[in-house]
Image (tube, rainbow, N blue to C red):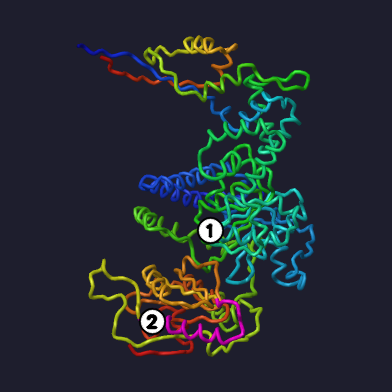
Amino acid sequence: MSSYLVAQTSVEIRWKREIENAECLAIMYAIDSGYNTRDALIFALPQFSQNRIEAALTILFASQLVTVQIEQLILSPDAMLIDEITMSPKLILPIVADEVTIPFMLSAFKQLGIENPGLALDTVFFNPKSINDVLG
Amino acid sequence: MDNIITDEGFMPQASFLRHIDDWIEYLCLLIERMEEQREKVKYQRQLRWVLGFRQGTNCSLIHNNIIAALYANVEFDTTRLIDNSNTYIPIQDCYKKDPQGHAFKQIEKAMACESLFLLQGPPGTGKTTAIVEVVLQTLKQNPNARILITSETHVAVDNALDRLSREFNEESLSMMMRYQKFSDSTELENPLVKDVEASTLHDKVWNTALERTPILTGKLWERLAKLDNREGVPRWLARNLADTHQVIGVTCNQIEHLIDECSQSFDLAIIDECSKATMPEWIMAMSVAQKCLLVGDHKQLPPTFCSEESDALSELEGYQEKLIRDGVIDRIFTNAPQEIKGTLLTQFRMQPNIGDFISKEFYNGELLHYQQQIVDPSLNFGWLTYDTQQLFPNPRLPKDKRVLNNKIEIEIIKQKLTLLAAEHSSSLNSKALDVAIITPYKAQKKALKKMREQLNFNNMLIEIDTVDAFQGKEASVVFFSFVRNNGSAQFYGDARRLNVALSRGKSHVYLVGDCQYLGKQNINALSSLTKLNTLSRVEC
């Protein structure tokens, strides 16, 4: 019986460093729960100082994860799904690490149900690593 | 800023920068050698802050210039550093009694100084009271002021916060935070102050959140737990709590837990026991505040270095090791102009005859004594000595087997303790007598602790420690066990170590040692000590 190598790659997907902090995550969760004004956020998140909420909002605006419409904060419909992906176990793909390119990930995000994969690519970082299993 | 230090001041910048570079070299060596991860992280953190200070990323560059000028002993114009336009009225009762007194004058000077002030507090002169007054005056002047109270030890931070809390009402107390928590060994005078521990505040904000938004809080509790799996208060919450509290107590090495690029700077950082802190430790505190008050006493012990640290130091050039061991505080205090430094001169701890000795030997006779002499001066400060042919340590043993403990001194202390316990029982005093037994050597400390296990006095609290560890503490009765009666007495003959050892006792200080041997040492303070009364002498 012969054995052969099957290319496998694990891909870890995480929020970019500036977003992966308690303040940004809490704001996304709070807006998702309906606390969608600055005052409502400050009320709902007493764990956080006002200046840190303001600073985190600036980051979220810059990345378009949160936008403002008529003084209301709107969370990108993809934000919570991206967060779920970042918390999921690493993806194991039957390809070599070099194939995990930006277009590949764009298509992967689409298949995972993300409406705006460009936003996902801009806000997460992915780290492909080769894992070669010997299969018989 | 150019005007703050005269042109000549820029050249000497180099000598302080050179000393910072010595530290950088030393910290890199330590990081390389240290196996324990926790220690490695501590030195990496210190290195980051020292580099930051060197690059000028700290809060006030005036600090860099002043320290450099003082280090190089260059004169500079202090007029721009002092604002004498405000008048100050004492807040604490002890200062109200004598608003024109020397102690309150030092507070006024510290308040008038806008950037850096050095306050020397010899033993028992009310350093903590002065710290509390400066905090209260700062808050009176600016009710929104952010104040950092820090030290290299938990005990010093605890004491300052505990004392300050007694001056605060419930509302003021809510602006205070102790990160992470009060040390278990600190006896707090105000039990309410426990409420300001970061862990309590952590529970409080989460409970408030739970009351306001139960579903969201449940989700966040679960999600944010994944961000920081350290025990205790997560760093992100510690930083938020630091933002929302005005008066924060934290050790120097933990300041970084509370500070990031989003944090507001402090208006005032008070660094207690600064002479015991290493340069990176006080630099960390100085770096986050506009104004800095360094409180300490360079006539007491400098920073201590553990064996791993000493090994790394010995790899540096001799001059680098000496500069690092000596610390910077002594030098900058000595060179500082009168406008930016002060000394507390009235000691409240010791009986006058003990205080007199300390004053003459270590403070040029400048210390005054608040207490009246109520204990017989011929009996409360003197020798419990012995005559013996035995040598401690035994020079006949190989070097690695020479243990620095002395069983004769232990026996003398044991007998005296028994007498004291009996005397205390027959007195009407129901309060336990607090006794400290201090010694220069760890082996003797260990042996003394074994002896204590055999005793069973329920009217006495006996604390046993090395001199170095006992700095900042006090007891009614102190025994000082010298141990060594041959070889060099340089270690305990160090004036700073003797100063600490002899100035801990409030009413009695018993010197337990071979008086004859000590008299032969060519060390001034030891020679003066041997002239004190002999209270008992035993033949062994």
Q: Residues within 10 Å of mark 1 (few under 14, many from 20)?
A: some
The residue depicted at 74 percent of the width and 55 percent of the height is: B170
Helix, strand or loop for the magenta stretch, by majority:
helix
Counting from the top left corner in percent of width and height, residue A95 is at: 38, 12
Q: Which mark is residue B51?
A: none
Instruction: Relative to A68, say whether B164 is above or below.
Output: below
Counting from the top left corner in percent of width and height, residue B179 is at: 59, 50
Residue under pointer 2: B411
What is the chain letter for disc 1?
Answer: B
The magenta segment: B408-433
Residue under pointer 1: B153
- Quick one: SS at disc 1? loop
Are discs 1 and 2 less than 8 Å apart at CB?
no
Counting from the top left corner in percent of width and height, residue B400 is at: 26, 66
Q: Are marks 1 and 2 on the same chain?
A: yes
* Left or right: A129 as drawn, with respect to B64: left
Point out the tag, 1 or 2, that comes first from the N-terminus.
1
- Identified by mark 1, the residue type is Thr
B416 magenta-colored: yes
Report if residue B364 is visible in the image: no
Q: Quadrant of residue B41?
A: top left
A104 magenta-colored: no
- Identified by mark 2, the residue type is Glu
Report if residue B394 is visible in the image: yes
Q: Closer to the observer: label 1 or label 2? A: 2
